[in-house]
């Protein structure tokens, strides 16, 4: 697939297990930070292995009923770490998106309505997590990735299988 058939967006993406998380938000919202936090969560075992797809600028391309994300060649394997600058790390060249996380989302609510938890990008419907200004996105992202069917193959912790009440 050529870059000319893709739409360029500002954001970050990581591959969690076999599905990508696309992180969007305004400049300075913490997209790179969340991407790196998710990579660290994968290394610590909180999530399946998590690998960078791209940071800062991405190509997204609809393909049948999926949305593929990939980095532009000049940014492959690079991520900004605030306080350290641009760093190189392992990356994957392309991945299918299954979750969009919108940072500083104006429609973020404590108990969002079902329609706020879905978004359509390039005619592909995807799961979505809106995160409000001032809230740390990492616990919300990990919760979404370990509780939304189809987002990852993460196994729940043994105590999560117990019935409550």
Image (spheres, rainbow, N blue to C red):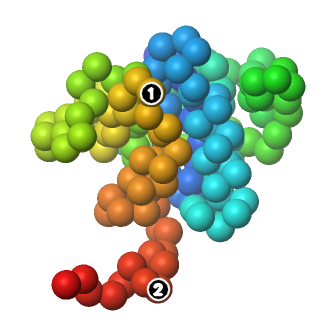
Q: Dot 1 lies on which element? A: loop
Instruction: Residue at 42%, 56% (x, y): give it.
Output: 143
Q: Residue 162 placed where, x, y %?
A: 33, 87
Q: Looking at the rendering, which quadrant does residue 28 occupy? A: top right
Q: Quadrant of the C terminus?
A: bottom left
- How many C-alpha atoms fall within 10 Å of the one at disc 1: few (<14), some, or many (≥20)? few
Q: Is residue 22 left or right of residue 85?
A: left
| Residue at image location 48% in from the left, 39% down from the top | 137
- Residue ID at (44%, 27%): 134
Q: Nearer the viewer's eye, disc 2 or disc 1?
A: 1
Per the model, the C-alpha gap separating discs 2 and 1 is 31 Å
Compare residues 99 and 138 and report the one nearer the observer. 138
Callout 2 secondary element: helix
Q: Residue 132, percent across and down?
A: 36, 28
User: In the rendering, at what x and y percent does residue 131 appear?
Assistant: 37, 33
Establish if 106 lies above or below 42. Answer: above
The answer to whether 12 is drawn above or below residue 15 in the figure is above
| 100 left or right, relative to 60 | left
Question: What numbered label is drawn on residue 158?
Answer: 2
Q: In the image, is residue 134 above or below residue 145?
A: above
Q: Quadrant of residue 78?
A: top right
On the image, which quarter does residue 114 sit in?
A: top left
Which residue, given by chain and number where applicable, does mark 1 sit on? 134
């Amino acid at each position: 697939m050529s870059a000319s058939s893709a739409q360029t967006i500002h954001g970050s993406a990581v591959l969690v297990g076999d599905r990508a998380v696309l992180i969007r938000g305004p400049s300075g919202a913490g997209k790179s930070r969340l991407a790196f936090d998710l990579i660290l969560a994968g290394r610590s075992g909180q999530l399946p292995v998590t690998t960078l797809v791209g940071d800062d600028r991405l190509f997204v391309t609809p393909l049948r009923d999926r949305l593929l994300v990939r980095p532009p060649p000049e940014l492959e394997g690079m991520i900004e770490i605030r306080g350290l600058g641009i760093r190189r790390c392992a990356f994957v060249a392309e991945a299918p998106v299954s979750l969009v996380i919108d940072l500083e989302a104006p429609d973020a609510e404590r108990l969002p309505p079902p329609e706020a938890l879905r978004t359509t990008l390039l005619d592909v419907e995807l799961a979505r997590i809106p995160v409000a200004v001032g809230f740390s996105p990492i616990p919300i992202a990990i919760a979404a990735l370990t509780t939304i069917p189809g987002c990852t193959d993460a196994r729940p912790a043994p105590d999560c299988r117990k019935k409550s009440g």
